[in-house]
């Protein structure tokens, strides 16, 4: 998704023989291979916490002649530490394409989607943490209501949470049915055929199971400091909860630090921001009409870009 736009944003930052590229969310390596082919970085690192994604990415990278990419089996929140272990202090470009991959959604067995009946797992890394079913087996109505409200922006959060806790479903289809039956008639009319009644509940649980907003907050805290001067960080998000965080952090980093009150300063002495929003990406970019025609999932994707301008 947004492959052309990602290359337009990050390839200029890879210029030179020392370019270091980091893909925080390798997935099936679509963006990564396009960036390597267009930008020819000296070194590339790719993180993904899903073992199935890493295995497929490895095959694709080998087939594309990019077998020297270092695939890291870790969440991207550990990026700074893992790069430091590899002796990398500064990087030229970082991409994070947030959320789940088409592989995770389409392989029903992982329990991410209401479309295929499967055990309710939803973990990107099935070897760590608790599955959605394990969480639902123990959660109380108040806690689940907060999750559905905050992470799913679900107006019927309390009704749905009450029904889910009463049923404690363990499969995707059982959860989808409980949610559909619990949704109020006005909400049902409001969403119409636009989305499945369980879409927001599945999103909220997935974000919670994988601590996706916590991961994003750690990326936003650490990744800018890893950029070399001229380096760029590109983040693609899929919903407003993520995009708002990215937009606010990028805006804060690109504002100059406040001038101390009552300290006279000449214009050339004023503190300057270390980061900027490249003008052509200042408002974020969305998929072009030709991509939307091929891939309707791209309609909610937005790419934002931050550039380091000072050491
Ligand atoms: C939208 S997909 C990326 C697709 C990829 N850009 C491509 O071209 O195929 C997101 C991927 O990031 C991984 N992921 C999500 N959050 C992660 C995290 N915090 N740490 C590491 N990997 C993560 C998921 O497992 C998934 O494979």
Image (tube, rainbow, N blue to C red):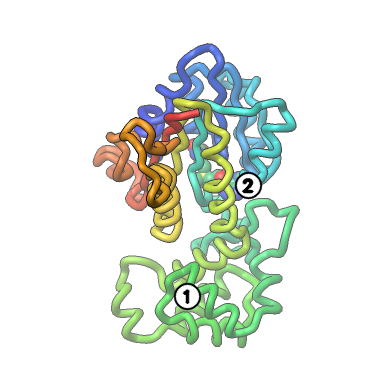
User: Is there a contact, CB below 8 Å, between mark 2 and mark 1?
Assistant: no
Tell me which residue sits at (45%, 32%) in the image.
308
Residue at the spot of label 2: 77
Q: Residues within 10 Å of mark 1 (few under 14, many from 20)?
A: some
Q: CA distance from mark 2 to mark 1?
A: 25 Å
Count residues near mark 2 (Cα–Cα under 10 Å), then give few for <14, some for 14-19, many for 20+: many
The image quadrant of residue 170 is bottom right
Q: Position of residue 148 (x, y in %)?
A: 50, 74
Q: Quadrant of ligand 1?
A: top right
Q: Residue at x 56, y 74 (%)?
A: 175
Looking at the image, how many numbered discs can be counted on the residues?
2
Q: Residue at x 56, y 62 (%)?
A: 206
> Residue 60: horizontal and vertical position, in percent?
58, 28
* Whether residue 20 is situated above or below residue 169 in the rendered picture: above
Tag 2 secondary structure: helix
Q: Is residue 114 left or right of residue 285?
A: right
- Residue 286 percent across, percent down from the top left: 31, 44
Cβ at disc 2 under 8 Å from ligand 1: yes
Observer able to see residue 103: no
Please say if 143 is above or below 276: below
Depth check: 210 or 296 in front? 210
Q: Which residue is mark 1?
A: 149
Q: Is the residue indicated by label 1 positioned so its CB lies within 8 Å of ligand 1? A: no
x and y, in percent, of residue 184 in the image = 39, 86
Q: Secondary structure at mark 1?
A: helix
Classify 42 as above or below 22: above
Q: Is residue 159 left or right of residue 303?
A: right
* Closer to us: 156 or 244: 244
Q: Which numbered circle lies on residue 2?
A: none
Residue located 47% across and 84% down the image: 182
Q: Quadrant of residue 266?
A: top left
């Amino acid at each position: 998704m947004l492959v052309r736009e990602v290359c337009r944003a990050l390839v200029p930052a890879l210029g030179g023989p020392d370019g270091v590229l980091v893909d925080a969310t390798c997935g099936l390596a679509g963006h990564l291979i396009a960036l390597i082919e267009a930008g020819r970085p000296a070194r590339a690192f790719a993180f993904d916490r899903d073992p199935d994604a890493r295995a497929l990415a490895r095959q694709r990278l080998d087939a594309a002649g990019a077998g020297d990419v270092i695939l890291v089996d870790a969440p991207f929140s550990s990026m700074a530490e893992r790069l430091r272990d590899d002796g990398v202090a500064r990087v030229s470009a970082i991409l994070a394409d947030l959320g789940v991959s088409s592989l995770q959604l389409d392989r029903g067995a992982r329990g991410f989607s209401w479309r295929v009946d499967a055990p309710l797992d939803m973990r990107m890394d099935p070897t760590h943490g608790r599955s959605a079913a394990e969480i639902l087996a123990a959660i109380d109505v108040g806690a689940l209501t907060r999750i559905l409200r905050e992470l799913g922006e679900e107006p019927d959060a309390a009704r749905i949470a009450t029904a889910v806790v009463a049923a404690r479903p363990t499969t995707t289809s059982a959860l989808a049915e409980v949610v559909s039956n619990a949704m109020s008639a006005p909400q049902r009319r409001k969403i119409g055929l636009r989305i499945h009644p369980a879409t927001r509940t599945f999103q909220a649980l997935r974000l919670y199971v994988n601590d996706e907003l916590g991961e994003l907050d750690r990326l936003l805290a650490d990744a800018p400091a890893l950029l070399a001067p001229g380096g760029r960080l590109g983040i693609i998000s899929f919903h407003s909860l993520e995009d708002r965080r990215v937009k606010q952090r990028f805006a804060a980093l690109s504002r100059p630090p406040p001038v101390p009150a009552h300290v006279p300063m000449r214009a050339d002495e004023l503190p300057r921001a270390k980061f900027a929003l490249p003008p052509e990406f200042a408002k974020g970019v969305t998929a072009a009409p030709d991509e939307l025609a091929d891939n309707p999932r791209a309609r909610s994707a937005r790419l934002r870009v931050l550039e380091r301008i000072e050491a």
